Amino acid sequence: MSDALRPSPISPTVDYDRDGVQHGMLRLPYSRDDSAWGSVMIPICVIKNGDGPVALLSGGNHGDEYEGPLALYDLARTLDPKDVTGTVIIVPAMNYPAFQMGTRTSPVDKGNMNRLFPGKPDGTVTQKIADYFQRHLLPRADIVLDFHSGGRTLDFLPFCAAHVLDDKALEAKAMAAVEAFSAPYSARMLEIDAVGMYDTAAEEQGKVFVTTELGGGGTATAKTTRIARLGLMNVLRHAGIVGGAVESRRTQWLDMPSVDCFSFAEDEGLYEAMVDLGDPIEKGDIIARVHSITRTGRPPQDIRAKLSGVLAARHFPGLVKPGDCASVVAVLVD
């Protein structure tokens, strides 16, 4: 039997077609040593008021990123269905096992949710969750907002983003939603590896997809949490799901036009930032240095910018390994 015909093992305790507010669970059976007939219980909230557009809102795609869950748990608690036209589906922590442990990947199967789409109904726990989103939640949505930040290993300028797409009409709708979000920075993103991403799954279904990178270091700040909450409401207003005008803030657009935006460490060692987030950079400038820690007396590895722009992201912890993303340079757009 093909995956498209297999039933999902996940059963929701909410009715997506019922008006009002429902707080429930996506229950995924998971038999394990400490619970023979156990389940993974993923919180979900559905707020519906009549017919209208559907927003699918998610955080915790990676379990060590917190602005999204903070904004979404708060929205689920406070959004009044009388203020809604259509439906808001809120999943504050998609990869709930990872979110519980504060890790990027799932402690159950080491699955990276954002690299496992379209998922498998008979696969690992993480693949089963991805499959449920792929076949049961994304088809309902008109607009999808998936919150991200740098987690424990990256730190970003706070930006909202959408992807450069072959479908320019869909791209234009996504970029308009990004502008409505009104983060301090807005980005046109080119992914270095889009295979298996939730983003790609949504876009291939023709959904308006918006994402963020709002900070990092495995925590959320007061500033980045405020950005998430404001942007969330702005996207719902922009989509016509919540009434009222978008609360616009000035945003600086960034472009990530090629793989030259990304630099990677080639050696392990001690990471020294030579510029800070948002600082201007010229092609050839030293962005960071990696100092050897296995012997004294060795010169550092210089990581140089391959294009001019601003520092949009950097490796966060003090130590790096070969292959770690060391920096991301973005180009300012007038």
Image (cartoon, rainbow, N blue to C red):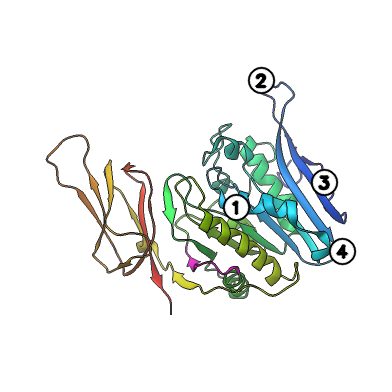
Q: How far across and how far down the image is residue 251, in percent?
A: 50, 72
Residue 262 in picture, x, y percent from top left: 37, 58
**Residue occupied by mark 3:** 14
The C terminus sits in image quarter: bottom left
Residue on which the image places disc 1: 68
Distance from the alpha carbon under mark 4 to that under mark 2:
43 Å
The residue where tag 4 is placed is 50
Considering only vertical position in the picture, is 117 above or below 107? below
Mark number displayed over residue 34:
2
Q: Quadrant of the N terminus?
A: top right
Indicate which disc, 1 or 2, sits on the residue closer to the N terminus: 2
Question: In the image shown, does 30 or 204 lie closer to the viewer?
Answer: 30
Q: Secondary structure at mark 1?
A: helix
Give the Cα separation between the discs numbered 3 and 2.
27 Å
Which amino acid type is shown beneath numbered disc 4? Gly
Q: Is residue 309 left or right of residue 40?
A: left
Mark 2 lies on a secondary structure that is: loop
Q: Does residue 183 show up magenta in the picture? A: yes
Q: Residues within 10 Å of mark 4 (few under 14, many from 20)?
A: some
Q: What segment carries the magenta color?
A: 181-190
Farthest left residue? 297
The mark that comes first in sequence, 3 or 4, is: 3
